[in-house]
């Protein structure tokens, strides 16, 4: 099977899927952007984050997504606390999980100390192991839906970890888009799905179960090539007993390349 003429889905909204759409069209494939989650910003995230930094006095700050960066700095601008937030973060050694997160930080004039070779919690663990950071303190602004793997990993290395939850993630059900997806899904006209996060996996199943039984979902997914961006996403798919291929690189481009290989 080649990707030519095949319908490939990504669990993102269309605005976040430019790279994916362009790549699919260049290969004569049919891209389908399927939003599965919605970001809900928590209240007073900037004030609370700055307060936690003052109280915790971390040596490091670790950013796990560009979303966290954008939410913090967007609100900081709105409430005239941009310089305070910038200074609070700049007084720590900043580590970003991947290049997009690094780019978002640098757009706010934040110097990024390191990005792991593996864009994942495991890669971050490798960085801190090499740094011999035992006894140091770290703050992680992130989603309340995040699992505890990174926190546990860094704690085992010897760091004192403080997580600051700045947004929630809920399932996002756009009826028009999901109805179109389901019609293709039930007719076996979906050939590949790229899952971008563990949250998107959970939401995908929660929403799709509104349309058909779990038995039908599992049966249909067996005929579809599934690619996971990162081990956490892959592990979440495994919990649903979905056979999947881990992306070569934990990026959209890496997932696309992997989809080319498995089709």
Image: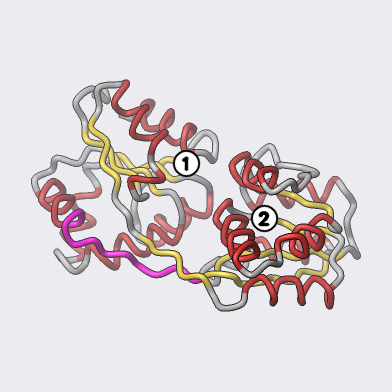
Work out whether residue 263 or residue 173 is closer to the camera in this orientation and state it: 173
Quadrant of the rendered image containing residue 178: bottom left
When the figure is inspected, residue 188 is found, relative to residue 65, above or below; the finding is: above
Mark nearer the viewer, 1 or 2:
2
Residue 23, position in %: x, y?
A: 37, 27
Work out whether residue 43 or residue 121 is closer to the camera in this orientation and state it: 43
When the figure is inspected, residue 203 is found, relative to residue 27, above or below; the finding is: below
Residue at image coords 82%, 69%: 160
Work out whether residue 201 or residue 177 is closer to the camera in this orientation and state it: 177
Image disc number at residue 140 = none
Residue 156, position in %: x, y?
A: 78, 64
| Residue 117 as seen in the image, left or right of residue 171 | right
When the figure is inspected, residue 72 is found, relative to residue 15, above or below; the finding is: below
Image disc number at residue 246 = 1
Quadrant of the rendered image containing residue 115: top right
First in sequence, mark 1 or 2: give its number: 2
| Residue 239 as seen in the image, left or right of residue 91 | left
Residue 183, position in %: x, y?
A: 10, 51
Q: Residues within 10 Å of mark 2 (few under 14, many from 20)?
A: many
Q: Quadrant of the C terminus?
A: top left
Residues under labels 1 and 2: Cα distance?
22 Å
| Circle 2: element type | strand
Residue at image coords 8%, 45%: 187
| Circle 1: element type | strand
Write down the region rendered in magenta: 168-178
Q: Which residue is mark 2?
A: 63
Work out whether residue 16 or residue 4 is closer to the camera in this orientation and state it: 16
Residue 70, position in %: x, y?
A: 58, 55
* Residue 157 is inside the magenta segment: no
Quadrant of the rendered image containing residue 190: top left
């Amino acid at each position: 099977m080649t990707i030519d003429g095949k319908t490939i889905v990504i669990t993102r909204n269309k605005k976040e899927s430019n790279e994916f759409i362009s790549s699919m069209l260049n290969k004569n494939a049919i891209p389908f952007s399927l939003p599965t989650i919605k970001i809900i910003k928590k209240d007073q995230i900037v004030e609370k984050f700055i307060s936690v930094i003052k109280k915790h006095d971390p040596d490091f700050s670790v950013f796990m997504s560009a979303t966290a960066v954008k939410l913090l700095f967007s609100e900081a601008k709105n409430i005239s606390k941009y310089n305070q937030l910038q200074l609070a973060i700049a007084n720590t050694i900043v580590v970003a999980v991947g290049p997009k997160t690094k780019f978002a930080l640098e757009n706010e004039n934040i110097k990024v100390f390191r990005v792991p070779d593996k864009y994942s919690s495991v890669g971050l663990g490798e960085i801190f192991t090499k740094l011999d950071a035992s006894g140091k303190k770290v703050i992680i602004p992130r989603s309340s839906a995040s699992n505890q793997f990174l926190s546990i990993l860094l704690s085992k290395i010897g760091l004192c970890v403080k997580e600051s939850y700045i947004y929630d993630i809920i399932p996002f059900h756009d009826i028009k888009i999901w109805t179109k997806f389901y019609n293709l899904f039930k007719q076996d006209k979906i050939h590949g799905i790229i899952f971008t996060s563990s949250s998107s996996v959970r939401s995908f199943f929660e929403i799709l179960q509104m349309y058909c039984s779990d038995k039908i979902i599992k049966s249909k997914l067996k005929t579809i090539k599934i690619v996971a961006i990162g081990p956490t996403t892959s592990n979440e798919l495994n919990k649903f007993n979905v056979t999947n291929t881990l992306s070569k690189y934990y990026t959209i481009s890496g997932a696309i390349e992997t989809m080319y290989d498995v089709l």
